[in-house]
Image: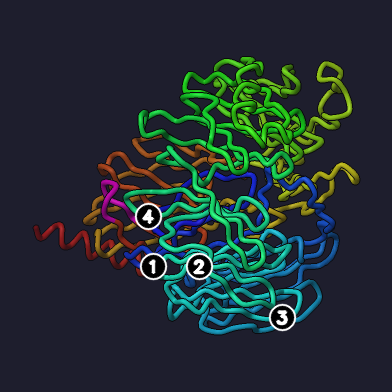
Amino acid sequence: MQCKASSKEKDGGNRFYVFMTLLVLIGLGLSVGIIFYKGMDATVGTGFEENYELNAMVGFEYTNWNTPGVGNLYIKNIGEEKQLIAKQIGSEQYVYSAISGTLAYVDHTNNLYIAKQGVAAIQISKNVSGDGLSFSKSGKYLFFNSSLDSSQWYFYDIRNNSKGIYTDAEQNNVYIDEDSEDIYYLDASNHLYKKSKGGDKKQIAANVEEYSVIGKNEVLCRLNRGNPTYVIYHARGQKIQEERIENIDDIDLTRLEGSNKQKLLCFIGHSSSEPNVSHLYVKLKGQEAIKVAENVTSYSYCEEDNSLYYLNSEQILYQLAVPKVNKKYLGNRTYFIRALEECKVAAILKNCSYFKSSPNHGNIMARTQDGTLYLCRNNMKFKLASGSLQEDLFNDYVVYRTAKNEIFVQQDINNKELEALEQPILLTDQAQGDYTTSLYGKYITYACLEGEGNEQKVAIKAYNKATGIVDILGDANTYDKVLVNQLTYIRKLKYDEVVGAYACADYNCLVKMESDGTFRLYRDGVEQVSCMQTYEGYSRASLMVEEGGIIAHLNPYDSYEITTVMTVGTKITLSMNGSCEVNVDGSTTYTLTPITEEVFNQRLEQQKKVEEER
């Protein structure tokens, strides 16, 4: 978990605790909000069990073109009829936790509600901003901020229906350990506090620029802006012990790893003598850090084989066998340095662009620049696939999606030698975009094509090792937007939904989509382009026409886009959420309004008369 006092957002995660910052756009201004997450990230979670069952989904239907971004919200139990939860809800004003089975949403009057399957919604707060809604990873807590004051944040305990507030309005860095329910936060004066459940708060440090919780009651802080100092605070009981990290100028607090059992901390940093070189360090408790590698771009510590895997700037993946820490090493740093110098360093993979470790730190998954995917363990590697576009590694399986729209699962990766792994399971060969996984890998959720010809539909499915493939929704396009587990599916517009007439007064243009597939664009009473459309159904980002200087296609997000190259740089967007626009030269955007056939003809005649008079 990494928190910082400034408003800048850093990418990355760590194996201890993760804090993520949400940037919320309000009008033309930019403000900083907070997302609060469960302590352990998906890359660590060795003891966490996902004991929930995937039995529901959330659906959203836009009301009509005249109410942009607003629609009806539903919960649907698998195999049952959908349940209407609320009307006139913004398309981005709700969140759902599959773990707790709780749906939270903000209505058009800024009231916050929660609802569960088969249970009537209850209001839990008012004057709430729908942009900042988020659930903690365990689903225990709902976090939101005030619509009156965006810096005022609240958390709501789903279990006992209680709401808490962070009293410092300028406080913008909070972390909640959902197991112990300890709260760490920075106040407006950059003081770091810890508040235990049912106890008083106590100050841990002052002048804190950013911090990361690295273990139970242990926090690594960056102090003093402009002249950074790094200190580990051991906050056990009422006593706070300080441990300063010397001779390192810049530690990336978003990428801390290690082992409490081994009393070992690993991190990437820069020394004062080589400020532009990223070094990999290891540190034993109470000792000065030791540099073990240079020019490191990423790394992972695997406790299972007690190894450091790291990728350098030349894109070579190495394995460094770290000696198991004992009392001798803890008592004398010199012995540990000698042991590290004698450790074997092995080059595992060249041209490596990405790698990660499994949550139990038993395996390494690595991908080369050409998309070849490998599973690595004990200084060995095994080729899993070619042309991988997306992949994830969990304790006992690997899932990956190929360039051929296939999704495979390689099961039981710990049970056998790498060379003896069985053939992977094919989930689908017609995947529609990325799959998603639940936090600790119990479920894989994906959209795929099923059927042939006019009967072809987009289905939502989930895979679980115990139950196999589960059918969630036979036709995802019965909704405009579907939320299942971590997967969000957005329906693509049908052609007949955009048939009609449109006008843009500011740009003085008229647009007409004919039912026979003809597209017409008029400017100042003169027809700019006319051509016939073709339509390829639900295919992802399908090209519809390229004729007469106009290209029309389905946008992969939620828009039906038409780009004309004859009227230089003009792009017309007809969006499912009702936001119709004309963009000129990539800079100026005007509103495009649906109009009736009669109004279209009247305005076209008016434009022609004006043009004739000129």
Looking at the image, tell me whether mark 2 or mark 1 is earlier in sequence order.
1
Between 464 and 241, the one nearer to me in the picture: 241
Task: Say if residue 368 shows up in the picture.
Answer: yes
Discs 1, 3 touching: Cβ within 8 Å:
no
| Residue 587 included in the magenta stretch of the image | yes
Q: Which residue is mark 4?
A: 224
Q: Quick one: label 4 or label 2, which is nearer the N terminus? A: 2
- Quadrant in the rendering for residue 463: top right
| Residue 320 appears left or right of 464 | left
Mark 4 secondary-structure assignment: loop
In the image, which disc is placed on residue 26?
1
Q: Judging from the image, what secondary structure is the residue with disc 2 in?
A: strand
Q: Which residue is mark 3?
A: 161
Closer to the chain start, of discs 4 and 3, is 3
Mark in front: 4 vs 3: 4
Instruction: Give the secondary structure at mark 3.
Output: loop
The Cα–Cα distance between marks 2 and 1, rounded to whole angstroms, is: 9 Å
What range is drawn magenta here? 582-588
Using the numbered discs, state the Cα–Cα distance from disc 1 to disc 4 in whole angstroms.
31 Å
Q: Is residue 433 visible?
A: no
Q: CA distance from mark 1 to mark 3?
A: 30 Å
Q: CA distance from mark 4 to mark 2?
A: 33 Å
The residue wearing badge 2 is 131
